[in-house]
Image (cartoon, helix red, strand yellow):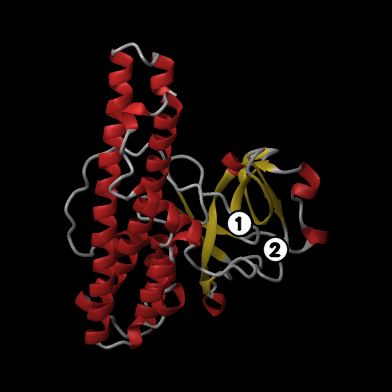
Amino acid sequence: MRTRRLTAWAGLAVSAAGLWRSFRRVEVTGSSMSPTLRPGDRLVVVAPPLGPPPWPKPGHIVAVRDPRQPDRILIKRVGDVNRAAGTVEVVGDEQTASTDSRTFGAVSRSLIVGRAVYRYGPSARRGPLPPPWGVPSSLMTSHKDEFDRILTSTYLDGIEDRSLGDIRAMRTECQEAEVALSYLRRLVQGRLDIVHAYLEHPGSDQPPDLSALVEELPDILSSGPGRPPGPGHLPQLFTPDTEESDLTAELDAVLGPDQIASLADLGVDQLRDIATRLEAIEQRLSSDRRALHERIDVLQAELVERHKTGRATVDGLLS
């Protein structure tokens, strides 16, 4: 039972950030984040292997490169986020013991290594790190409305009469929507893999070493049900430029972060019901992604045609 609980929480730490992300282990060495974190705490940090992570929200705990010594990793809490300037303020919870943005200023988003989500040691303090202050996990109506608008059957009507700027803007919003849906689909797949791990590999009463468990997480998450390959489009972006919690209401209603820790207490029928509902979400998201790919292809073809006929420059085509 204990093994399965630890696997669920640690698995969520990785899957909640998308399966195409990497993760690393970081040990806290100072007291700048006391009392939340203490020297010797060992953390799982998730981050994308390509490009910066999604914009953090105030209250997130992140690993960040020291701007004065980039090979040194600091663990801090996010303060102000300035998207226009591309910077993030990082501060320690214990001000008197922290060297942070109050000393070296806001840091570039590119220096953010990733978000710390799980403390796997010492054993007495293991568990998920607290969420940002007062932030619910919900799907913002504005995002759902945008997806619905783009996926309507009339979205592409009259594109031949639209301006070049309009076509480029439509292509961009379709690409951004595709990235968001792909990201959400990865989250669904990660949680589905964890549920299948319970269904297919009953847990042992002998708890494993936590360090070894963290090392084995990729195998746990990759052992889920086989899936057909995607349509083969190379994404133009790698992470959605929106808050993660803005996308996850439906997913959380089926299997939220808090529920994952209780999967070990559920019966087989309950687990199968959860898996069936997650599979239905995954299938719908896959269908929506295909529709977005079709729109992107049509818009790109229109831009290419305008270039061939002299109605668009190369710079206009690529911008």
Q: Which residue bears the numbered disc 2? A: 33
Seen from the viewer's position, the closer of residues 205 and 56 is 56
Q: In the displayed structure, would residue 299 be above or below residue 19?
A: above
Query: Would residue 202 be seen by someone viewing this image from the given angle?
Result: no
Residue 243 coordinates in the image, percent (x, y): 52, 56
Residue 152 coordinates in the image, percent (x, y): 32, 50
> Residue 309 occupies which quadrant of the picture?
top left
Seen from the viewer's position, the closer of residues 304 and 240 is 304
> Residue 19 occupies which quadrant of the picture?
bottom left
> Residue 29 occupies which quadrant of the picture?
bottom right
Q: In the displayed structure, would residue 80 be above or below residue 160?
A: below
Query: Would residue 99 be seen by someone viewing this image from the given angle?
Result: yes
Q: Amino acid at mark 2?
A: Met
Q: Which residue bears the numbered disc 1? A: 57
**Residue at 38% in and 42% down:** 174
Mark 2 burial class by Cα count in 10 Å: few <14, some 14-19, many 20+: many
The reply, left or right, for residue 160 in relation to residue 248 is left
Q: CA distance from mark 1 to mark 2?
A: 17 Å
The reply, left or right, for residue 102 in relation to residue 129 is right
**Residue at 80% in and 60% down:** 95
**Residue at 16% in and 53% down:** 228
